[in-house]
């Protein structure tokens, strides 16, 4: 199985129901992560964080900057 065959999770920040959308996003991450790390074992923590930041999208960066 190639990684290019797997659709990565994407957070929909424009959803009218963010809690439910986040739960679905989180479940998708868990499934994707299991596939990804089964294919490519021994990922270092920085890579895991980088993937998460990519998946949550630009809106997350705005929110993170707000709390700094």
Image (cartoon, rainbow, N blue to C red):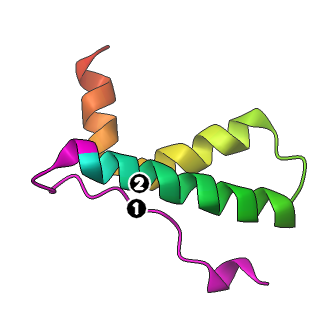
The local crowd at label 1, few if under 14, some if 14 to 19, many if 20 or more residues have their Cα within 10 Å, is: some
In the image: residue 45, left or right of residue 23: right
The C terminus is located in which quarter? top left
Q: Which residue is mark 1?
A: 10
The residue identified by callout 2 is 25
* Residues packed near mark 2 inside 10 Å, few (<14), some (14 to 19) or many (20 plus): some
Q: Are marks 1 and 2 in contact (CB under 8 Å)?
A: yes
Label 1 to label 2: alpha-carbon separation: 7 Å
Residue at left offset 76%, top offset 83% = 2
Q: Secondary structure at mark 2?
A: helix
Residue under the image location 26 percent in, 31 percent down:
63
> Taking 16 as reference, is 67 above or below it?
above
Q: Is residue 11 magenta?
A: yes
| Magenta region, residue range | 1-19
| Nearer the observer, 52 or 31 | 31
Q: Earlier in the sequence, mark 1 or mark 2?
A: 1
**Which residue occupies the extreme left position in the image?**
16
Mark 1, mark 2: which one is toward the viewer? Answer: 2
Q: Residue 43: horizontal and vertical position, in percent?
A: 82, 46
């Amino acid at each position: 199985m190639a990684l290019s065959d797997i659709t990565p999770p994407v957070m929909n920040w424009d959803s009218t129901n963010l809690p439910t959308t986040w739960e679905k996003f989180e479940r998708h991450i868990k499934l994707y992560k299991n596939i990804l790390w089964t294919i490519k074992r021994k990922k270092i923590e920085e890579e895991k964080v980088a993937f998460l930041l990519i998946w949550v999208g630009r809106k997350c960066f705005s929110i993170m900057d707000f709390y700094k």
